[in-house]
């Protein structure tokens, strides 16, 4: 019985000695300010659909005055997704959102279709 106690005591001491001798260190990571600036620029460009390979919703395609009216109506009704007007000679497009997946765009379209029944999803070509 004493042998078992001695063995158990020895194992416990061995275990606790390893824990108490473990290394403790602090890691400091310093980030270059340029990295933060580039990341914020990338985020801004994604909001404007300049880097996106994703999907957007088109509310209108046509003349400038009606495009401005459409974007005003959209902004008065929704504030969840950013909207913008794109010009493609000779017409203006009202685009909403920058969705990374088709399912996200579909969910938004269901909500938007109530006020804009002609809205549809498209995958714009990447800006160069």
Image: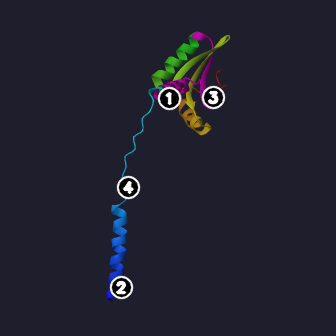
Q: Nearer the viewer, mark 3 or mark 1?
A: 1
Q: Nearer the viewer, mark 3 or mark 2?
A: 2
Gap between marks 3 and 1, in whole Å?
30 Å
Q: Which residue is mark 2?
A: 4
Magenta stretch holds residue 37: yes
Earlier in the chain: of badge 4 and badge 3, it is 4
Earlier in the chain: of badge 3 and badge 2, it is 2
Earlier in the chain: of badge 4 and badge 2, it is 2
Identify which residue is drawn at 62% across, 11% down.
63
Locate residue 29: give its quadrant: top left
Locate residue 84: give its quadrant: top right
Earlier in the chain: of badge 3 and badge 1, it is 1
Identify which residue is drawn at 35% across, 85% down.
4
SS for dot 4? loop
Identify which residue is drawn at 38% across, 55% down.
23
State which region is magenta: 35-64
Residue 69, image x, y percentages: 53, 14
């Amino acid at each position: 019985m004493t042998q078992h106690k001695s063995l158990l005591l020895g194992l416990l001491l061995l275990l606790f000695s390893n824990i108490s001798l473990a290394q403790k260190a602090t890691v400091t990571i310093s980030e270059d300010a340029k990295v933060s600036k580039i990341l914020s620029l990338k985020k801004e460009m994604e909001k404007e659909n300049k880097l996106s390979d994703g999907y957007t919703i088109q509310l209108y395609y046509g003349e400038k005055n009606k495009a401005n009216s459409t974007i005003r109506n959209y902004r008065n009704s929704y504030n969840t997704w950013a909207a913008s007007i794109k010009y493609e000679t000779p017409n203006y497009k009202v685009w909403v959102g920058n969705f990374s997946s088709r399912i996200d765009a579909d969910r938004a379209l269901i909500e938007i279709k109530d006020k804009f029944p002609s809205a549809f999803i498209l995958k714009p070509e990447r800006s160069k």
